[in-house]
Amino acid sequence: MDVPAPKMYRLVIILALPLCASCLDNGLMLTPPMGWLAWERFRCDIDCENDPNNCISEKLFMDMADRLSEDGWRDLGYVYVNIDDCWSSKQRDKDGRLQADPKRFPGGIKKLAQYLHERGLKLGIYGDMGTYTCGGYPGSPLDKIELDAQTFADWEVDMFKYDGCYSNATEQEQGYPLMSKALNATGRPIGYSCSWPAYQGGLPPKVNYTQLGEICNLWRNYGDIQDSWSSVWSIVDWFFENQDALIPAAGPGRWNDPDMLIIGDFGLSMEQSRSQMALWAIMAAPLFMSNDLRTLSSGARVILQNKMIISINQDPLGIQGRRILKEKSGIQIFWRPLSKNTSALLFFSHRTDMPYRYKTSLSKLNYTAGSYKVTDVYTYKTLELKDSTEFVVSVNPTGVVMWHISAPAKLNSRLYFRGAQAAASGRDVGNDIPVLL
Ligand code: GLA
């Protein structure tokens, strides 16, 4: 059998497959959810008088819905429009129900949900299992769980993020499973995002990922993303340092969530934007953009709408990738097994000097013997590569080269290799190495 997966990881794949037998039984999010989420870019801006375009209001979410449906996002899978903190009134209504701030959401949440549904989109909303949300708005503590779940269902909400500020470990142990049950009991399919692990250090034994997979569709494992490369990298490094604990937790219907995509904001260079997108695809991470889709640069759009990377992210096997090599040179290599005998390979440079020419071969990266079809997901260049053939990739500082690799192809490799060209011209090809980029 010719499997293009590194030998030592085949066992991991086999073990990972049946795990969804224990995933949250709402049939949702069999691939990582995609959409837009307000928090990182728009935070708790409630100053609609002075900042009407950016404040947390129904206008902001309708604007984003218009962009998602008219600018090609929805058709690529970006369907959720998610409200985060600071949407509600500071008081519950006379019946004890949460209510949206009437000044900022004059139409109410249900109307907003319907606006989205008419456009083929879904609405997400935010709550917190403590007495207050992180931003100081009314929480949904234990005694309010059933009422609030029903309120969200009545409003036709499609996803719920349950944060953990102002709650303790004991309350969380009760509250997160209880909310799962309450959402299911409404009969409305509501994707459930749990912040529980992030409040408990993100790692076993304090965090029970088997249980999380049974009650939540996704969960935040770690701290909040901010608009900087150092923030992105600290998250990436934590995820891969702890990959042995995290990878088995992920699968169809149950995802680790390293937080939002900040591509199109202010903190990342183009290289770093490509890196975030590629790394989130390797991690099988939910793809929630937190940016301003009304003013997005075309560069950011091209990265976020890259079909090949999205399809890697959305691979139906749902196996989270891993870091397979950390070189002293600063080059790091990541790998994710994909369906149909394919895989994704990512070369990242942690260097700060200049593009680094990294030399290796697929067999050095544990690929089994054979010849593979390689496609660079950012340039769309393809070539055929034997496992034993040495090649060089040029990786920019804080940038990536990402490949999609499929099983032996019938392509004629000669066209692509300097060595082969030289052979055709009669030169000695002894140690010639194909240069890919
Ligand atoms: C926490 C969460 C963030 C965001 C804020 C809102 O910090 O981790 O994602 O929801 O609360 O206040």
Image (cartoon, rainbow, N blue to C red):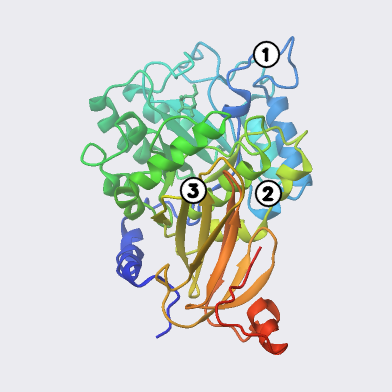
Q: Is residue 217 above or below residue 91?
A: below
Q: Position of residue 92 (x, y in %)?
A: 49, 14
Nearer to the camera, 118 or 273: 273
Name the kind of residue labelled 3 in the image: Ala
Q: Earlier in the sequence, mark 3 or mark 1?
A: 1
Q: Residue furthest left?
A: 205
Amino acid on which disc 1 is placed = Lys
Residue at (39% x, 33% y) in the render: 195
Vertical position of residue 292 compared to residue 420: above or below: above
- Of tags 2 and 1, which is closer to the observer? 2
- The answer to whether mark 2 is within 8 Å of ligand 1 is no
Q: Tell me the distance, in whole angstroms, between the alpha carbons under discs 2 and 1.
A: 36 Å
Determine the CA span between mark 3 and mark 1.
Answer: 35 Å
Task: Say which quadrant the N terminus sits in.
Answer: bottom left
Q: Which mark is residue 285?
A: 3
Tell me which residue sits at (63%, 52%) in the image: 77
According to the picture, the residue beneath numbered tag 2 turns out to be 303
> Ligand 1 near label 3 (Cβ, under 8 Å)?
no
Residue 190 % position (x, y): 48, 43
Give the residue at mark 1: 103
Graded by Cα atoms within 10 Å as few (under 14), some (14 to 19) or many (20 or more), the crowding at tag 1 reads few
